[in-house]
């Protein structure tokens, strides 16, 4: 272009940007593509501008800038649609689905992918658009656990790429095929596919495919006992990612290399790569990868003896895992709302069909069928509403009765205020979702038994905004009303409420009604921290709040409507058509049981994870982390007893002469003996070292019990030990130093493989002789 041989145009800069992007020059790619987009805008070339924006989105995604990438894709799609460019729209929709899938939003990813496939089928002469769609659909199946279906789709994509002679698409297909086969454990079949992908990527200078294939090859080599080949693949992957500035790629490469180095015993080198990977993951906002890196770094710190740092990393794993769990729970809740809309659309379509049939069949029979289908919809709506309400309420109200009562009270108030019966009944259902936003409040705040701090109060108040966001986007009147209630039921008539500080009639009537019903039910219901108020006392309290907290007109109505509510919430005088009581009871019972069962499973899983985090898997004793916690608690309480540090004598000799299996058996036996002698307070703190906390047994008796059990097993080895009590120091560290020194002194006086003769205690402390 500088020589004048090639005219400067948007298309020329677009091609330059594509070349830079494929070669891993993200800075050059973004500069060229921005220029292409600007030139295209000036030239009125919407098609080229859309293509440049699509490529810019790919560059942003490779840098870990996901939100920016999705925004660019939305702009690109608008340009392609305005130009009637269906092929360009297919590419953009495919890339949108790929990014949503990468974010873990698999259900959301299917929408643009399905739209891309439907649009592709209307085109002729664009066979090259099919493989990327199949690739991404394969990944959706893989993430859903259906690897067989994923592999089949990938083979179809490979066949399409080979048929069209498209080398880049073949490289991507070989990469995906090899990765899926590797995930299924078929290393033999995965190897040629991954090698082919890597070779094609190098020939084509396609750094993204080369980077991903190197990561997969590194994993394959590590599994097949080729550590140096694995190391070379991971190091090349790190180099490529750093050179390109591709943060997500760098994170994966450093995680794989760090794990490999740790397995090879190169702990310091592993830590360096893992810490760099963690910084890259934090910069790119990758919580799953951060959790994986913290987990491996915890093991690194434990091997280095840096227990506090290991504990910090372990806590970060727990926090990130909880964050991901909450995000997934929010996503699943939103999916229920979408399901609600799908069922409504299906119902409307079926009604239209039935109304057409009215012209050909008997009106009475068809209308009866319409009523039956409407009842089916009511049950489906109530099922979804019940799931949403129970999901939120079950966390701090295991019966779910609060939401049901608030719905009932709100419907009665609405009728008394002159609302049409259909609208009042709809409010009775929507009000059940007023606290659905509690799903997004951490347990540490929601279930805190004491007074909340100012910061925690702010967090709790977010449940209104969270609830509205969960319910937002609904097309049905019911969901729109539920969104309104969730957002406004904590606003106050005097403007001092939250989240928006609305006042007076600026607050929707639905929110004003539910505010009164919510407070009334809270006052008249017994809680662990208070007795139930009488209806009369609760109504007096509402009247004191009229004009400040509450709408005076709603409170005045409450005096006439709610004074006799104690007669029972199932009073037939005010049934809600959308809430048939028989159906409600059955559905509630079913979902209460489901939620109870899921809660038990979750608690069991949490307990098991907690147990494993504090258990030595070889001996079944507590591990170093458990010892640190128990020792700190014992030291803080200063209860009587001693701390004992033990070392397995002759373990190296057993490993060298009889093999490591015998050494492991010896350690298991030592752990069993310690657990028998001092149950519940014995720990393996690393390698051949053990510890006991709070021992009140005489040292000589402890020694005799240990040696007798070990000799009976036929092992020519014993345990050296050192004991320290409170007279040896005021701090836990001083006690451990004293016990450790005595253990090594004991070991030095012993003949290899034989027990010492005695251990006694004098006024200066406990020592080995």
Image (tube, helix red, strand yellow):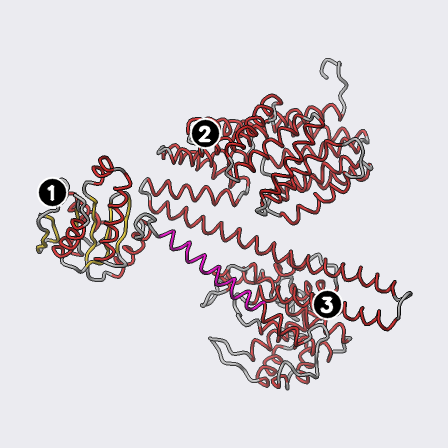
- Left or right of 169? Residue 601 is left
Q: Which is more N-terminal, label 3 or label 1?
A: 3
> How packed is label 2: few (under 14 Cα within 10 Å), some, or many (20 or more)?
many
Task: Identify whether 726 is placed above or below 235.
Answer: below
Specify few, some or many for label 3: CA neighbours under 10 Å numbering under 14, 14-19, or 20 or more. some
Secondary structure beneath label 1: loop
Give the Cα separation between the discs numbered 2 and 1. 45 Å
Q: Residues within 10 Å of mark 1 (few under 14, many from 20)?
A: some
Which residue is located at x 57 percent, y 64 percent?
Answer: 392
Residue 709: x and y, percent? 18, 52
Which one is nearer the viewer's eye here, 554 or 387?
387
Membership of 596 in magenta stretch: yes
Give the residue at mark 2: 230
Residue name at image x 24 percent, y 52 percent:
732
Q: Is residue 729 left or right of residue 147?
A: left
Q: Please name the residue that numbered disc 3 is placed on.
A: 376
Name the N-terminal-most of marks 3 and 2: 2
Q: Of label 2 and label 1, which has the lower sequence position?
A: 2
Q: Which residues are magenta?
A: 591-614
Which numbered dot is residue 750? 1
């Amino acid at each position: 272009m500088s020589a004048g041989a090639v005219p400067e145009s948007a298309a020329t800069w677009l091609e330059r940007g594509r070349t830079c992007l494929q070669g891993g020059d993200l800075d050059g790619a973004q500069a060229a593509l921005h220029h292409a987009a600007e030139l295209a805008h000036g030239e009125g070339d919407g098609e080229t501008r859309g293509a440049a924006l699509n490529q810019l989105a790919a560059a942003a995604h490779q840098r870990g800038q996901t939100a920016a990438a999705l925004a660019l894709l939305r702009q690109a799609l608008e340009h392609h649609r305005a130009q009637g460019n269906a092929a360009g729209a297919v590419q953009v929709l495919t890339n949108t689905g790929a990014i949503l899938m990468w974010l873990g939003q698999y259900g959301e990813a299917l929408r643009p992918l399905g739209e891309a496939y439907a649009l592709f089928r209307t085109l002729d002469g664009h066979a090259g658009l099919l493989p990327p769609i199949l690739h991404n659909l394969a990944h959706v199946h893989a993430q859903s656990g259906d690897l067989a279906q994923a592999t089949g789709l990938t083979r179809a994509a490979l066949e399409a790429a080979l048929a069209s002679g498209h080398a880049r698409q073949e490289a991507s297909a070989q990469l995906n095929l090899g990765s899926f086969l590797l995930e299924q454990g078929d290393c033999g079949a995965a190897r040629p596919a991954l090698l082919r992908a890597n070779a094609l990527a190098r020939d084509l200078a396609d750094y993204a495919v080369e980077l991903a294939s190197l990561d997969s090859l590194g994993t394959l080599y590590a599994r097949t006992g080729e550590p140096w080949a694995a190391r070379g693949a991971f190091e090349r992957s790190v180099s490529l990612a750093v050179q390109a500035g591709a943060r997500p790629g760098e994170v994966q490469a450093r995680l794989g290399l760090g794990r490999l180095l740790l397995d090879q015993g190169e702990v310091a080198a592993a830590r360096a790569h893992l810490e760099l990977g963690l910084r890259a993951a934090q910069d790119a906002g990758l919580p799953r990868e951060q959790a994986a890196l913290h987990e491996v770094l915890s093991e690194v710190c434990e091997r280095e003896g840096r227990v506090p740092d290991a504990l910090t990393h372990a806590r970060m794993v727990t926090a990130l895992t909880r964050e991901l769990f909450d995000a997934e729970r929010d996503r699943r809740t939103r999916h229920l709302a979408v399901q609600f809309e799908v069922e409504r659309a299906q119902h409307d379509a079926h009604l239209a069909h039935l109304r057409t049939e009215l012209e050909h069949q008997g009106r009475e029979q068809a209308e009866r069928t319409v009523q039956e289908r409407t009842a089916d919809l009511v049950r489906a709506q109530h099922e979804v509403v019940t799931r949403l309400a129970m999901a939120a309420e079950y966390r701090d109200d295991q019966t779910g009765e609060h939401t049901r009562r608030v719905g009932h009270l709100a419907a009665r108030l609405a009728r008394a205020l002159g609302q049409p019966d259909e609208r009042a009944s709809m409010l009775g259902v929507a009000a059940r979702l007023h606290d659905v936003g509690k799903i997004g409040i951490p347990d540490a705040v929601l279930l805190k038994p004491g007074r909340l701090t100012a910061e925690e109060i702010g967090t709790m108040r977010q449940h209104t905004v969270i609830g509205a966001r969960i319910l937002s986007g609904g097309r049905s009147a019911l969901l729109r009303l539920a969104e309104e209630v969730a957002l406004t039921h904590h606003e106050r008539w005097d403007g001092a409420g939250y989240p928006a500080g609305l006042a007076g009639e600026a607050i929707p009537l639905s929110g004003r009604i539910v505010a009164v019903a919510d407070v009334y039910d809270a006052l008249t219901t017994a809680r662990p921290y208070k007795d139930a108020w009488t209806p009369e006392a609760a109504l007096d309290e509402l009247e004191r709040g009229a004009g400040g907290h509450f709408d005076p007109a709603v409170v005045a109505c409450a005096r006439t409507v709610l004074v006799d509510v104690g007669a029972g919430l199932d009073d037939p005088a005010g049934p809600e058509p959308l809430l048939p009581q028989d159906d409600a009871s059955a559905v509630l019972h079913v979902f209460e049981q489901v939620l109870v069962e899921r809660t038990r499973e979750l608690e069991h899983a949490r307990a098991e994870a907690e147990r494993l985090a504090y258990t030595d898997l070889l001996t079944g004793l507590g591990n170093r982390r458990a010892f640190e916690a128990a020792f700190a608690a014992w030291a803080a309480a200063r209860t009587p007893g001693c701390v004992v540090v033990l070392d397995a004598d002759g373990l190296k000799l057993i490993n060298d002469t009889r093999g490591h299996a015998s050494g492991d058996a010896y350690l298991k036996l030592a752990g069993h003996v310690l657990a028998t002698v001092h149950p519940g307070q014995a720990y393996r703190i690393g390698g051949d070292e053990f510890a006991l906390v709070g021992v009140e047994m005489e040292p000589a008796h402890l020694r005799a019990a240990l040696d007798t059990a070990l000799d009976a097993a036929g092992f020519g080895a014993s345990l050296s030990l050192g004991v320290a009590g409170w007279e040896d120091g005021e701090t836990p560290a001083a006690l451990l130093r004293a016990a450790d020194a005595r253990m090594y002194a004991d070991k030095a006086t012993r003949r290899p493989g034989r027990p010492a003769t005695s251990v006694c205690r004098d006024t200066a402390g406990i020592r080995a002789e």
